[in-house]
């Protein structure tokens, strides 16, 4: 394991690309290290965990509404939606939206506590939907999930967003981007560009809106849309 010092650039200062956090996270996504069988088994357990907490929530209003929205976007060969027949396929970004809403509704899925806190299982719905639409293998999906977990856990250990009034979901954008990069085997530059986009959209927006209490729910909705948007771009 390598430790990286992360700090904000001073006015007028420019880091070499290789020192930027997004590039280093992209390198993690590009790392061809083999996934050990024990790790693959644990990734499968996390998928089961997501499904287990999503199923009891399917009849609640938010997941039902998200599922109805997904049904308005059918796509041949797209992603499946929890609670629907597996033959029903919708566009990957809408499958990610519907399944992510169901997984998140009861807030009972896996939790990681460190400098901040996180639900790394949130990474799985967009990765699974993209894997289905792009016809990726189970091994590809496992690599994407493991990468996303590694990135979100590392960010949660090192960067405390909560004390700065930024919701921990901001760490989810970069982790999903890294997971999609590993899943789709994109070049490091593509991964880095996705990571920069998600980080710039998630964190500054959160800081601005968090200054107003009424913006708290809007922050969460916008960040979910960012994750869905990235899945759409990756699956196009």
Image (tube, rainbow, N blue to C red):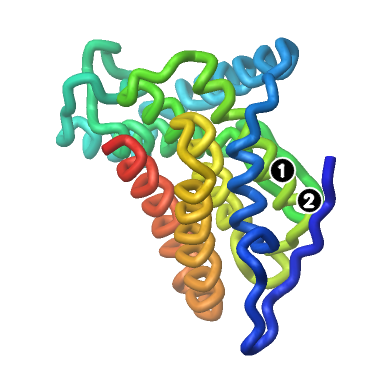
Q: Is residue 209 above or below residue 188?
A: below
Residue at x 65% of width, y 63% of height: 20
How far across and how far down the image is residue 178, in percent? 55, 42
* 58 w.r.t. 233: above or below: above
Residue at image location 53% in from the left, 33% down from the top: 182
Visible residue check, residue 161: yes
Name the secondary structure under disc 2: helix
Label 2 Cα crowd, 10 Å radius (few <14 / some 14-19 / many 20+): some
As helix, strand or loop, the secondary structure at mark 1 comes to helix
Q: Where is residue 201 in the image (x, y as percent from the top left)?
A: 46, 65
Label 1–label 2 contact, CB within 8 A: yes
Q: Distance between the residues labelled 1 and 2?
A: 6 Å
Task: Answer with the quarter of the image where residue 74 lies.
Answer: top left
**Residue picked out by circle 1:** 153
**Residue 3, placed above or below residue 40:** below
Relative placement, left or right, of 109 versus 186 is right
The residue labelled by disc 2 is 157
Q: Is residue 46 found left or right of 222 in the rendered image?
A: right
Identity of the residue drawn at 28% across and 18% down: 84
Query: Which quadrant of the figure contains the C terminus?
Result: top left
**Which of the 4 image quarters holds residue 46?**
top right
Q: Nearer the viewer, residue 15 or 214?
A: 15
Q: Quadrant of residue 10?
A: bottom right
């Amino acid at each position: 394991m390598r430790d990286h010092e992360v700090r904000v650039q001073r006015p007028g200062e420019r880091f070499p690309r290789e020192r930027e956090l997004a590039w280093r996270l992209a390198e993690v996504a590009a790392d061809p290290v083999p996934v050990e069988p024990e790790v693959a088994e644990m990734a499968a357990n996390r998928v089961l965990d997501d499904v287990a907490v999503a199923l009891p929530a399917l009849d609640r209003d938010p997941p039902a509404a998200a599922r109805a929205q997904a049904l308005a976007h059918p796509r041949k060969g797209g992603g499946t939606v929890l609670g629907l027949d597996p033959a029903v396929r919708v566009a990957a970004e809408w499958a990610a939206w519907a399944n992510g809403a169901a997984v998140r509704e009861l807030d009972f899925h896996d939790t990681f506590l460190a400098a901040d806190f996180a639900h790394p299982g949130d990474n799985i719905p967009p990765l699974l939907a993209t894997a289905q639409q792009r016809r990726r293998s189970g091994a590809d999906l496992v690599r994407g999930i493991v990468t996303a977990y590694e990135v979100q856990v590392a960010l949660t250990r090192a960067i405390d967003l909560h004390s700065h009034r930024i919701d921990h979901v901001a760490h989810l954008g970069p982790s999903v981007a890294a997971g999609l990069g590993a899943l789709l085997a994109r070049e490091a530059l593509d991964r880095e560009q996705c990571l920069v986009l998600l980080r710039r959209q998630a964190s500054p927006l959160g800081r601005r809106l968090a200054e107003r209490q009424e913006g708290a729910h809007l922050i969460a909705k916008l960040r979910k849309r960012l994750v869905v948007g990235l899945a759409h771009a990756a699956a196009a």
